[in-house]
Every structure is written in structure tokens, then in C-alpha cells.
Image (spheres, helix red, strand yellow):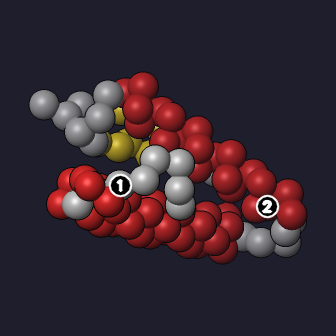
Amino acid sequence: MPGKMKLTVGGITYVVQGDGSDDYLNELGSALELKLKTITKSNPTLSTTMAAILAALEFCDEAKKAKQEIAHLQDELSYALATPHQLRIGES
């Protein structure tokens, strides 16, 4: 059963609930906090909201690219399993 916990990001404390452990949610919060600090350090005039939107876009970009890479690897695996006699180790 998911529990509730307090998480502070960007100077604001939120009560969050998720399927992951408290440690996992803290890791997510820490990653977001680090991203926000990196963005605001490079762009000190941005509001917290603007920095959060940029952080969200960066995380969405990373997630989309990761999903594309997974699909590509699944295709390669399916091909390799379907045609094992054509598999060449060490070639791209």
C-alpha cells in the first residue's frame, strides 16, 4: 500500500504518495531538486515555475529517448532470436 510522505523541492514542501518506497520518492525529489538548481544557476532570472517547466521538458525528453532506445533494442533482440544463424558477434 502506498504511503504518504513530505518532499521538499524548490523550497516548497509537498505531501506525495506513490507506489515506490520513501527512499525511491526521495531519490526522485533529489534528482528534481538538482535539475532545478542547475537550471536556475544557468538562468537566475527564471521563476521557480519556469525552471520547473524546463526541468519537466528535460525529463520528458530523457524518458522519450529511453523508450525509443528500448524499442530499438527489442527490435534487435526479436530479429536476433528470429534469425540466429545470421547473428554476427561484435558487428554493429
Is residue 55 found left or right of 76 in the rendered image? right
Name the residue at 49% across, 67% down. Answer: 65
- Graded by Cα atoms within 10 Å as few (under 14), some (14 to 19) or many (20 or more), the crowding at tag 2 reads some
Q: Is residue 25 left or right of residue 59?
A: left
- Is 10 in front, or is 61? 61
Q: Position of residue 7 (x, y in %)?
A: 48, 38
Q: CA distance from mark 2 to mark 1?
A: 48 Å
Q: Choose top left, top right, bottom left or bottom right for residue 82.
A: bottom left
Residue occupied by mark 1: 87
* Residue at 23% over, 60% down: 83
Report the quarter where the N terminus lies. Answer: top left
Q: Quadrant of residue 21?
A: top left
Q: Could you tell me if the residues under marks 2 and 1 are in contact, i.e. CB atoms within 8 Å?
A: no
Query: Which residue sits at x=58%, y=39%?
Result: 30
Q: Which residue is mark 2?
A: 40
Residue 54: give x, y in percent of width and height. 63, 71
Q: Residues within 10 Å of mark 1 (few under 14, many from 20)?
A: few
Let me know if residue 55 appears in the view: yes
Given this view, does label 2 or label 1 mark the residue nearer the observer? Answer: 1
Is residue 63 placed above or below 19 in the rendered structure? Answer: below
Q: Amino acid at mark 2?
A: Thr
